[in-house]
């Protein structure tokens, strides 16, 4: 059993994460972190890892080097928080679209609407979470 909120609390310590959403399927051996990124930190990271900083933000969020660097940071934050290996996300999906009240992905008290976030990003989640 993975306490998703515990993992999300650890991910909030990453400078690259604005809002994390952790998703886990019982048939998979790892969880997936769907990350609403901190734009300035991700742009800076893109320059550091050699990604094309002139590309649009959505493209940066899909860049393999950026994703790998964010995943490494996420894993380090989880380890520092004392999470078990099965609680640590095995992959990350960085989504450029913000989780907001307006798009139905947050409640008025700023809590994640898990079902709505999953539905909005289902195709991308299914593509990455294999």
Image (cartoon, rainbow, N blue to C red):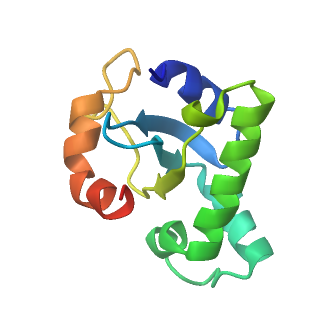
Q: Who's the residue at 38% across and 14% down the image?
A: 109
Position of the C terminus, as image quadrant, is bottom left
Write down the quadrant of residue 124 in the picture: bottom left
Which x, y percent locates residue 129? 37, 55
Identify the residue at horizontal 27%, vertical 52% (top origin): 121
User: Measured from the top left, where is residue 37 in percent x and y?
Assistant: 55, 50
**Residue at the spot x=65%, y=28% of the render?**
84
Quarter of the N terminus within the rendering: top left
Image quarter of residue 104: top left
View extreme (top): residue: 109
Q: Residue at x 59, y 56 (%)?
A: 39
In this rendering, is residue 81 above or below 36? above
Instruction: Using the image as rendered, state which of residue 98 and residue 51 is in the foreground.
Output: 51
Q: Give the camera-side residue of 39 and 119.
A: 119
Is residue 40 at all visible to an observer of this figure? no
Nearer to the camera, 52 or 121: 121
- Numbered-mark total: 0
Q: Relative to 68, does residue 36 appear above or below in the rendering?
A: above
Picture coordinates of residue 16 (x, y %)? Answer: 66, 49
Q: Is residue 22 visible?
A: yes
56 sits left or right of 98 in the view: right
Give coordinates of residue 100: x percent, y percent. Answer: 35, 37
Q: In the image, 121: left or right of 70?
A: left
């Amino acid at each position: 059993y993975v306490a998703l909120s515990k993992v999300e609390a650890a991910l909030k310590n990453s400078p690259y994460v604005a809002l994390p959403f952790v998703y886990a399927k019982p048939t998979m051996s790892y969880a997936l972190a769907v990350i609403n990124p901190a734009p300035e930190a991700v742009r800076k990271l893109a320059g550091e890892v050699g990604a094309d900083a002139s590309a649009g933000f959505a493209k940066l969020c899909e860049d393999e080097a950026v994703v790998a660097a964010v995943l490494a940071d996420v894993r380090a934050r989880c380890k520092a928080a004392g999470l078990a290996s099965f609680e640590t996300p095995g992959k990350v999906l960085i989504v450029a679209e913000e989780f907001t009240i307006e798009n139905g992905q947050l409640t008025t008290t700023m809590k994640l609407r898990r079902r709505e976030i999953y539905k909005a990003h289902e195709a991308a989640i299914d593509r990455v979470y294999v």
